Amino acid sequence: MDTAKLKAAFVRPAMERRRLWPLLLMSISLVLLSVAASTLGLLPYFRTVFYLPSPPQAAEPAGLRVPRLAYLVSGSNGDLERLWRALWALYHPRNLYVVHLDREAPAGEQQALAARVANDSLFAAVGNVIVIEKANMVTYRGPTMVANTLHACALLLKQSNDWDWFINLSASDYPLVTQDDLLHAFSTLPRNISFVEHTSQLAWKEEQRAKPVIVDPGLYLNKKTDVFWASQKRDLPTAFKLFTGSAWVALSREFVEFTVWGWDNLPRILLMYYTNFVSSPEGYFQTAICNAPEFAGTVANHDLHYIRWDVPPKQHPHLLTVEDMPSMVGSNAPFARKFPRDDPVLDRIDEELLGRRNGNLVVPGGWCAGDPPCSEVGDAAALRPGKGAERVAQLMDAIVRSKKFAQSQCR
């Protein structure tokens, strides 16, 4: 080998080694920063900055620690009485509640709801029911329902960070199990699981919801009116993938913080995108959770509801009656909708599923103390689960503790 070739053979590796040093140092720095971030609890922020995806796996169960649920129960004009009934059917002193009658409800109903909560001795003693007294406008076809849901999430986070799941319900929903049942069943679940029914198969929704551009007057008017439609349509986005599903969700607190605090820009981008989207409550949380790598592996494809739809589904589901009782119970779902006002089926649910009899507002549970029963709070962590807990456990076996959990995520 001549001298020139021999020199080149030694020089080139030396040059390459010099080029590799900065990369090696950067890699070491990233590893050290990752360890520090993990130690300090800043790993979610670190992943956001450096685009490091989390493993798409659920966390280990938190043992049998009794969780806390945070509810939004909302209604509109004429819903005062059934919202009040639903609130009591859902009540447990361990949970948190935000109740809201929207701007379409008369001022008298809104004031009456606030007065009832303030004057109830149990609510006053526990202090876990929040009334949104400055009513929001809520229109289902526009983005205002999403805004109202995020408002409730923010209030709950401000009230406490010691809760595990956020659940949104309307006054036309009703529970099919007691809160003792639900808390007992959820105590065995990983706390990072969210329940969001979803699919990326838009089908007819691509042309009728994703491509049209609408303006919701509910964003700037005091009266509810239909949305305005733009003459032109838009293409599907390429920066993120659209998902659609049910507007009724049960979100982990970790994911709620992700959407409300906005340490990643994705929730804000999607909020602006869905401002002009038809029926945005059926897409915002689905698209947010499935486009975030750290949460996509924690979503269960179910909305925890029994709902009876037409085939193909129309905008509103069938109203449930006594004839639907076997199907509701057989679904193992903890909630059902939609119920007519004061329908006899609600009395059947109260008596047969919730143990609420003789006109009592309170659903009895392990926390009940005092005379009359349940007038005072004993041990709020004491649960007295019944058959409802077994039904919900069977549902969790099917949608969380099975192969379906990973196989149906964000597809």
Image (cartoon, rainbow, N blue to C red):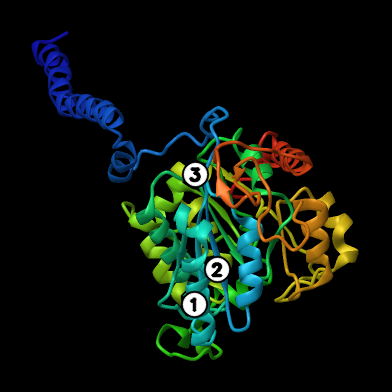
- The circle on residue 234 is 1
- Residue type marked 1: Arg
- The circle on residue 281 is 2
Viewer-side residue, 139 vs 201: 139
What residue is disc 3 on? 164
351 left or right of 185? Answer: right
- Residue type marked 2: Pro
348 left or right of 138? Answer: right
Q: Secondary structure at mark 2?
A: helix
Classed neighbour count for the residue bearing mark 2: other residues with Cα under 10 Å, few (<14), some (14–19), many (≥20): many
Would you say the residues marked 3 and 2 are in contact, meaning their CB atoms lie under 8 Å apart?
A: no
349 left or right of 305? Answer: right
Q: Secondary structure at mark 1?
A: loop
In the displayed structure, 109 sits above or below 357; it is below
Quadrant in the rendering for residue 259: bottom left
- The circle on residue 68 is none
Q: CA distance from mark 1 to mark 2?
A: 19 Å
Residue pictured at 47% horizontal, 85% vertical: 218
Viewer-side residue, 217 vs 223: 223
